[in-house]
Image (cartoon, rainbow, N blue to C red):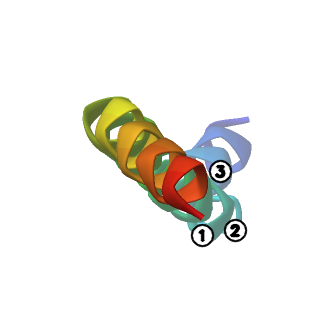
Amino acid sequence: MRECLQALLWDEQGASLVEYALVVTLIAIVAIIAISAFGNNTSTVLGTAAASV
């Protein structure tokens, strides 16, 4: 029983999946912040350019 528990504690097979999930989450958070920060400004600039054409 003890050997089985030690094997479960030291098993790193799912660690890479968790790391990839954290990276994807971080990228999504940065993208949301960037869109929130620059979204209104970009919309205004593109709207002005479209209106002048």
Where is residue 24, by image quadrant?
bottom right
N-terminal of the pair, mark 3 or mark 1, is 3
Q: Amino acid at mark 3?
A: Glu
Report, in whole angstroms, how far the alpha carbon at label 2 lies from the one at label 3. 17 Å
Q: Nearer the viewer, residue 13 or 3?
A: 13
The disc at residue 3 is: 3
Q: Nearer the viewer, mark 2 or mark 3?
A: 2
Evaluate if marks 1 and 2 touch, with contact meaning CB atoms under 8 Å apart: yes
38 lies left or right of 17: left
Which element is circle 1 on? helix
Q: Nearer the viewer, residue 45 or 3?
A: 45
The residue that mark 2 highlights is 13
Q: Nearer the viewer, mark 3 or mark 1?
A: 1
Report, in whole angstroms, how far the alpha carbon at label 1 lies from the one at label 2. 7 Å
7 lies left or right of 51: right
Residue at (65, 50) in percent of width and height = 3
N-terminal of the pair, mark 2 or mark 3, is 3
Q: Amino acid at mark 2?
A: Gln
Residue at (48, 50) in percent of width and height = 22
Report, in whole angstroms, how far the alpha carbon at label 3 lies from the one at label 1. 23 Å
The disc at residue 24 is: none
Query: Badge 3: how crowded within 10 Å, few (<14), some, or many (20+)?
Result: few
* Quadrant of the drawing holding the C terminus: bottom right
The residue that mark 1 highlights is 16
